[in-house]
Structure formats: structure tokens, C-alpha cells
Image (cartoon, rainbow, N blue to C red):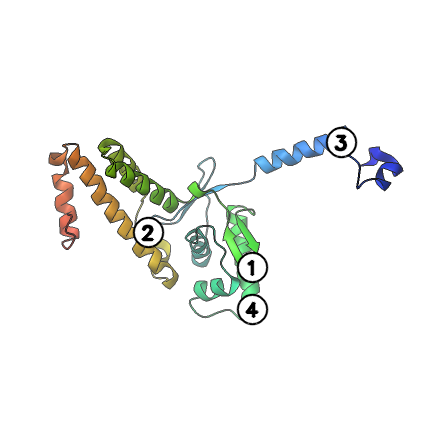
């Protein structure tokens, strides 16, 4: 800090942080910038959908770019190596310079959804968003809460929580990458959990004496899933 003078600079390792007006203003600007960093909500239970804090839809163009975001989203905050991303996003045909190709793709994604949304570390790239910023995570958390309420005999609460969980869905899971090998396990798991949550919600509704209103839905579900015993 220029306000310390030479003596202050010589003793910088032991001196207190600068409290001059210029430093305070700089810190205030930094805090304001940090508080306004772009954060996003990512929807993968249906076609990919990305929105900012204000609900504004953020366009993510390009098949491979959308696949990258979905791949990072289903990793639940874990890092994915450059080699694995190159293998999965280029359908087993790794680009000659995999590191640069992946880096360029990540750069494009940062430009679309915010530079702080994707982080690079020793283990690779990972999506940096809140736990409730990805609809699939919210869905799973609400299903767990709904099943707990169902097991405790809190029928109305269970029905509400499970209905809210099912409301996260806008279409088939991971619709943009339905044919991608890396997505197969996640699609199967989420789709099965969706059907099980639907059965649980129906059980809660039946316990509340709402069976008559469920007949059309049950008939449709039984036709779609004839081997499901619960239906």
C-alpha cells in the first residue's frame, strides 16, 4: 500500500492489513463482483435447459457442447479427466490433440454459462454449482424425503413431496445424449427412480382415500408397463 511508505514496505510481513480508503474501496468492489458472479441452474430431466439466477434461458449451442455440460452435470461435482472427456465426447475417436480440443470446448462452455461454472484441477474438469442447481439432484433428494414420509405414515406430506419431485421432469432424462454410451447408466437409473417414485406417490394417494381419481392414470401406466407388479 502506498500509504505505508518505505518503512511499511520493509516490515510488510509483520504489519497489519492496510486500512486506507483506497484499499477499502477496492475490497468493496471485489466483494460486489464476487457476489454477482453468474450462477446457473441446469436441467437434464428432459432436453438440456440452462437458466441464470433470474430465470433467463442461456443458449448452449452445439451437440458436443451440450453433451459436455450434461456429462459434467451427471458427475455430481466429481472431476472428469481430459482423456475420458475426449474419449466420451468424440464417440471413441479421440482428437489428435485431445487436451487442446477439450480445453477449447470447455472455453466455449464457460462463455455460454459463466467462466466460474467449470473448474479445472489435477483430476480434470468439474461442474461447480450448488447441489440444488441440477434438477436431477433435486429430484433424487425430494424422492428420498418423500419415501421417508411415506414410511412414517405421513401420507399427505409424502404425496406432496413425490409430486414435487416428479414435477422436475420435462421429458426423457438426458434427452440430448440419449444415444451416448456415457449416458446409458444415468438414463436407466433416473428413469427407474422416476417410475418407482410415481408408484410411491400413488401409494400415498391411495392411503389418503383418493383411489377413484387415480383410475385413469393407473390404467395408462399399467398399459405402458404391463410387467410392473405394483401397477
Label 3: which secondary element: helix
Name the residue that disc number 1 marks. 103
**Horizontal relation, residue 124 to residue 22: left or right:** left
Name the residue that disc number 3 marks. 22
> Residue 218: which disc?
none
For marks 3 and 2 on the same chain, the one whose residue lies earlier in the sequence: 3
For marks 3 and 1 on the same chain, the one whose residue lies earlier in the sequence: 3
Structural crowding at the residue carrying mark 3, measured as other residues with C-alpha within 10 Å and reported as few (<14), some (14–19) or many (≥20): few
Q: Is residue 179 above or below residue 74?
A: below
Name the residue that disc number 4 marks. 97
For marks 2 and 4 on the same chain, the one whose residue lies earlier in the sequence: 4
Residue 157 % position (x, y) = 27, 32
Residue 62 % position (x, y) = 45, 56
Q: Is residue 105 above or below residue 203?
A: below
What is the CA distance from the residue labelled 4 to the residue labelled 1? Answer: 10 Å
**Do the numbered discs 3 and 1 sit on residues whose CB atoms are within 8 Å?**
no
For marks 2 and 1 on the same chain, the one whose residue lies earlier in the sequence: 1
The residue under the point 44% across, 50% down is 76
What is the CA distance from the residue labelled 2 to the residue labelled 1? Answer: 27 Å
The residue under the point 53% across, 58% down is 124
Along the line of sight, which residue is nearer the eye, 182 or 177?
182
Q: Nearer the viewer, mark 3 or mark 4?
A: 3
**Horizontal relation, residue 156 to residue 127: left or right:** left
Q: Quadrant where the N terminus lies?
A: top right
For marks 3 and 4 on the same chain, the one whose residue lies earlier in the sequence: 3
Question: Residue lying farthest right?
Answer: 6
Label 4: which secondary element: loop
Residue 18 % position (x, y) = 77, 33
Name the residue that disc number 2 marks. 173
Amino acid at each position: 500500500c502506498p500509504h505505508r511508505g518505505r518503512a511499511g514496505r520493509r516490515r510488510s510481513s509483520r504489519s497489519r492489513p492496510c486500512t486506507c480508503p483506497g484499499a477499502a474501496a477496492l475490497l468493496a468492489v471485489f466483494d460486489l463482483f464476487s457476489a454477482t458472479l453468474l450462477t446457473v441452474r441446469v436441467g437434464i430431466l428432459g432436453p438440456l435447459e440452462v437458466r441464470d439466477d433470474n430465470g433467463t434461458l442461456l443458449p448452449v449451442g452445439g451437440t458436443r457442447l451440450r453433451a459436455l455440460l450434461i456429462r459434467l452435470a451427471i458427475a455430481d461435482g466429481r472431476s472428469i479427466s481430459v482423456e475420458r472427456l475426449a474419449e466420451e465426447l468424440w464417440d471413441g475417436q479421440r482428437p489428435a490433440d485431445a487436451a487442446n480440443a477439450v480445453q477449447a470446448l470447455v472455453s466455449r462452455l464457460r462463455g455460454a454459462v459463466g467462466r466460474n461454472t467449470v473448474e479445472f484441477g489435477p483430476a480434470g474438469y468439474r461442474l461447480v454449482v450448488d447441489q440444488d442447481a441440477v434438477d436431477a439432484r433435486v429430484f433424487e433428494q425430494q424422492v428420498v424425503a418423500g419415501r421417508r414420509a411415506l414410511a412414517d405414515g405421513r401420507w399427505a406430506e409424502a404425496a406432496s413431496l413425490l409430486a414435487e419431485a416428479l414435477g422436475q421432469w420435462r421429458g426423457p432424462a438426458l434427452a440430448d445424449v440419449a444415444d451416448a454410451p456415457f449416458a446409458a447408466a444415468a438414463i436407466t437409473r433416473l428413469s427407474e427412480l422416476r417410475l418407482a417414485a410415481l408408484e410411491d406417490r400413488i401409494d400415498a394417494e391411495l392411503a389418503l382415500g383418493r383411489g377413484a381419481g387415480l383410475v385413469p392414470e393407473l390404467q395408462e401406466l399399467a398399459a405402458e408397463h404391463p410387467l410392473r407388479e405394483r401397477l
